[in-house]
Amino acid sequence: MGSTLRQIALECGVAVSTVSRALNGHPHVNEETRRLIRETAERLGYRPSAAARALRGSGTRTVGVVLPDMMNAFYARTISMVQDQLEERGHSVVMAVTNNEGRRERTGLERLIASGVDGIIVVPTPTRRPPTPEGPPLVEMNRRSSRRVDWVGYDEDEGARTLAGLLVGAGHHDIAFIGGQPSFSTTRRLLEGYRRALAEAGVEPDPRWVQLRAYSPDWGSEALRRLLPLRPAPTAVCASSSELVLGLLTEARRRGLRLPSELSLVAFGKTDWYAVTDPGITTYEQPIEQVAHIAVQLLADRMAGSTADPTTVLVEGRAVERDSVADGPRAALRHRNLTANDSSSIVMMRSVSPNLR
């Protein structure tokens, strides 16, 4: 099996981007490093894939990536994965950040197209207009604005259903949902999964338990402040991003609220610190690397001339259970009922066998 650019980079002690530039004839690599990289690639049996060869045949060997927010840990991780995948195929990345504003998205797309990029991967803003046929190939990722282009994203519906189902299974029925902007397609899909899990358990959620506004720590804190005075108060919360979890945890600690004994918590997303906080957060992890790989592959196919109908790829994640969920009131009720039944059985046995101790 052939090597990858990452393996070559490790062997040579350089960055993946340096390997990519050296193998593709970029001028800004000194001759000694270039020779070392090429010799190492030959020794390791490196062979570019068909997709990589197709990409290298393009004009500028650059791909535009349009993201809503680089301060968001999820999107920072996404761009890192996409960049790795593109550099494996001999392309560099030109970025545009929209801050979820339609005007900035339009300006960014126009700038990328004018610069001559060979293709574009975009996470659309909520107000994005459907793309037009003009311009380079375009693939949408995560959010979706049109069925006229290729799209790859996460199964948020199933993710939220899984998380809410874990809470129901632990004996919680009073479960709140904290989410971002209601106009975002990801928010709507997550909310649908949450509602579906409760409906399957025969639970009618209190509309006050659903708190939507923004994917930010400030909103996570404020949403918890709104939830705690409710009667009945939620015994568990399903949060839809790491920013919301951060705000929620900050507010919980400020109030002296103990997790999970006084409030259980589950969260959507893949964030390293979920595993090291106290308690560790039960989460539904998105396969970011897999989605990045598929997005780049879809774009490579289009740039190689594919005229197939637009492709839709929905990728499932996985639940990772940690320590942030405690038994809910209904689990305690079941336990009390079982204990009472056991006690009744002992009383009945004693009535038959007076010597039972």
Image (cartoon, helix red, strand yellow):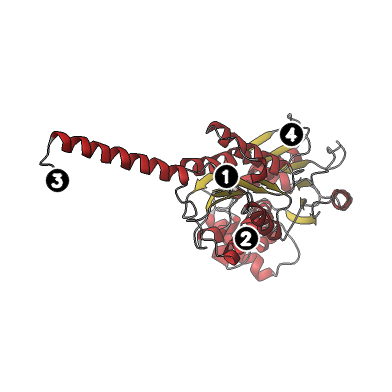
Total marks in image: 4
10 Å crowding of disc 3: few (<14), some (14-19), many (20+):
few
Q: Determine whether the residue tagged by mark 2 lies in a helix, strand or loop.
A: helix
Alpha-carbon span between mark 1 and mark 3: 43 Å
- Residue 246: which disc? 2
Q: Are marks 4 and 2 in contact (CB under 8 Å)?
A: no
Q: Position of residue 257 (x, y in %)?
A: 54, 61
- Residue 86: which disc? none
Between discs 1 and 3, the one toward the N terminus: 1
Q: Are marks 1 and 3 in contact (CB under 8 Å)?
A: no
Alpha-carbon span between mark 4 and mark 2: 43 Å
Type of the residue with mark 3: Arg
Dot 4 corresponds to which residue? 306
Q: Are marks 3 and 4 in contact (CB under 8 Å)?
A: no
The answer to which of 332 and 322 lies nearer the viewer is 332
Q: Determine whether the residue tagged by mark 3 lies in a helix, strand or loop.
A: loop
Between discs 4 and 1, the one toward the N terminus: 1
Type of the residue with mark 2: Leu
Dot 3 corresponds to which residue? 357
Between discs 2 and 3, the one toward the N terminus: 2
Q: Determine whether the residue tagged by mark 4 lies in a helix, strand or loop.
A: loop
Between discs 1 and 2, the one toward the N terminus: 1
Between discs 4 and 2, the one toward the N terminus: 2
10 Å crowding of disc 4: few (<14), some (14-19), many (20+):
few
The answer to which of 148 and 198 lies nearer the viewer is 198
Type of the residue with mark 4: Ser
Locate residue 210: give its quadrant: top right
Dot 1 corresponds to which residue? 175
Type of the residue with mark 1: Ile
